[in-house]
Amino acid sequence: MALADKDLSRARMLGRRFGISRCVEDYHEFLDEVDGVIVAVPNHLHGPIAGELLERRIPVLVEKPLAPTLAEATQLVAASRRLGVPLQVGHMYRYNKATHLVSRLLDERRLGRLLGFSLVFATTYGWPVASGFAWTRAQAGGGVLIDLAPHTLDLLLLWLGDVVDVEYRDDNLGGVEAECHLSLALTGRGEVVRGEVILSRLRALGTTARIVGEHFTLEYGFTSWLGVRLWPSAWDGEASFASAADTFPRIYAEQLRAFAQAITDRTEPFVCGESVLKTIALVDRCYRERRPLGHPWEKPFDAEILKAAQ
């Protein structure tokens, strides 16, 4: 195993922690020695580095998003197909047992006719970071949308089908958005189902997805509780059923296990590049059709209201 980081002291720190002695500044130094590479760099470097590795026929696990744009992501998928080299993407929630339980409940139509959905992933940002790339459009490709779409919109598309319509608003005033709202219409497995999404780095509103059916409502937890709650839609009591919660260590381990299997068998990974293109296409569309979110303090001043108050 080997680690590469422009800041060699950081690579060595991780090397000591995980027992990896080979630490370098330039990843090119070890490409002839490895069976696969995990690409965990700022978003704008995903395409160039992963593309180079694929051309050298080295399997790649790319941290989400696969690329900042649909065009770049499509090029990587095409290279993977052309060369027959595994290309995996770090959508770790796809490995959550609860994710598969939701799919099963929907496949078996346990909820009945789907009536709507809502998704909130809103927390005050607190990740320790080594750089400010996530707040630079040129390096990140966007803000909270491109950061959280692989965790949130990806699952909605997996569960509820393709996009019929979307209205997107965010608070970007020239940099990157810190909060965005989406009104989505999805095919809903043969029926159009509509819902709302709130993604935010500013407000602690929770991290759950809810799908409401004619018979049952389910709730999926993204962070502290990686499970599913299910209760009759006509009942406002406590959840009547809860799945066993999964853990972040296990889903990350499953992601790495899947990558190792793809390398060994030279087969398509469980979360291959092609499987995330719909999510990236939705992000692209949102940014193209963006409308301002607006804030209460931006509304025009009404002098008549002030007069009446006096």
Image: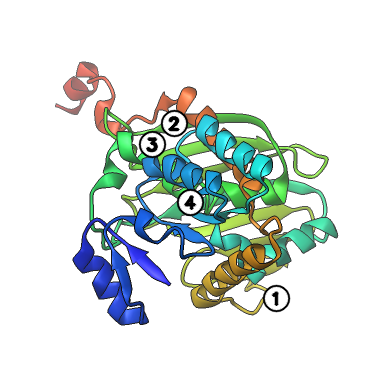
- The residue singled out by tag 1 in the image is 241
Mark 2 against mark 4, which lies toward the viewer? Answer: 4
Task: Count residues near mark 1 (Cα–Cα under 10 Å), then give few for <14, some for 14-19, many for 20+.
Answer: few
- Mark number displayed over residue 64: 4
Q: Residue furthest front?
A: 32
- The residue singled out by tag 3 in the image is 141
Mark 2 against mark 3, which lies toward the viewer? Answer: 3
C-alpha distance separating marks 2 and 3: 16 Å
Check the picture and name the quadrant holding the C terminus: top left
**Colour mode of the rendering:** rainbow
- The residue singled out by tag 2 in the image is 169
User: Which amino acid is tagged 2?
Assistant: Arg
Task: Count residues near mark 4 (Cα–Cα under 10 Å), then give few for <14, some for 14-19, many for 20+.
Answer: many
Position of 140 relative to 251 (above/below) = above
Q: Position of residue 183 (x, y in %)?
A: 56, 35
SS type, badge 4: loop
User: Which amino acid is tagged 3?
Assistant: Gly
User: Which amino acid is tagged 4?
Assistant: Lys
Q: Is residue 239 left or right of residue 62?
A: right
Which of marks 3 and 1 precedes in the sequence? 3
